[in-house]
Amino acid sequence: MASLPAVSGKRCVRALSKVGYRVARQKGSHCRLVCDGRPPVTVPLHDELAPGTLRAILRTVELGIGDFTALLD
């Protein structure tokens, strides 16, 4: 099993945009992403996402750790 990478909220949003997510709205330091045919997800725009938060985001968008890591490159 691959380990979770340490990523910022902005980098996470950039990676998720590669699979079709787009920013629907932002309030404060939280960004709501939507994608046709997939559930919406909220990403905190922090300097580094907590591992549990990142894991919950990946579970919501139905992406594996390896797939997400590939999107970061």
Image (tube, grey):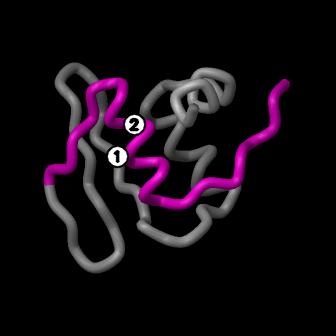
Q: Residue at x 26, y 55 (%)?
A: 32
Residue type highlighted by circle 2: Leu
Q: Residue at x 81, y 29 (%)?
A: 2
Q: Residue at x 39, y 48 (%)?
A: 13
Q: Is residue 8 above or below residue 36?
A: below
Q: What segment carries the magenta color?
A: 1-24
Q: Which of the pair 27/69 is nearer the observer?
A: 69
Give residue 22's quadrant in the image.
Answer: top left
Q: Residue at x 35, y 24 (%)?
A: 19
* Label at residue 57: none
Q: CA distance from mark 2 to mark 1?
A: 10 Å
Question: Helix, strand or loop at disc 1?
Answer: strand
Q: Contact (CB < 8 A) between labels 2 and 1?
A: yes
Please indicate whether residue 5 sits to the left or right of residue 3 in the image: left
The spot of residue 37 in percent (x, y) is: 22, 20
For label 1, the crowd category at 10 Å Cα-Cα, with few meaning under 14, some 14 to 19 and many 20 or more, is: some
Q: Residue furthest front?
A: 73
Q: Is residue 34 above or below residue 20?
A: below
Question: Helix, strand or loop at disc 2?
Answer: helix
* Label at residue 16: 2
For discs 2 and 1, the disc positioned in front in the rendered view: 2
The spot of residue 7 in percent (x, y) is: 61, 54
Q: Is residue 6 magenta?
A: yes
Question: In the rendered image, which residue does mark 1 sit on?
Answer: 41
Residue type highlighted by circle 1: Val
Choose the circle earlier in sequence order: 2 or 1.
2
Please indicate whether residue 13 sits to the left or right of residue 39 in the image: right
For label 2, the crowd category at 10 Å Cα-Cα, with few meaning under 14, some 14 to 19 and many 20 or more, is: many
The spot of residue 1 in percent (x, y) is: 84, 24
Please indicate whether residue 12 sits to the left or right of residue 3 in the image: left
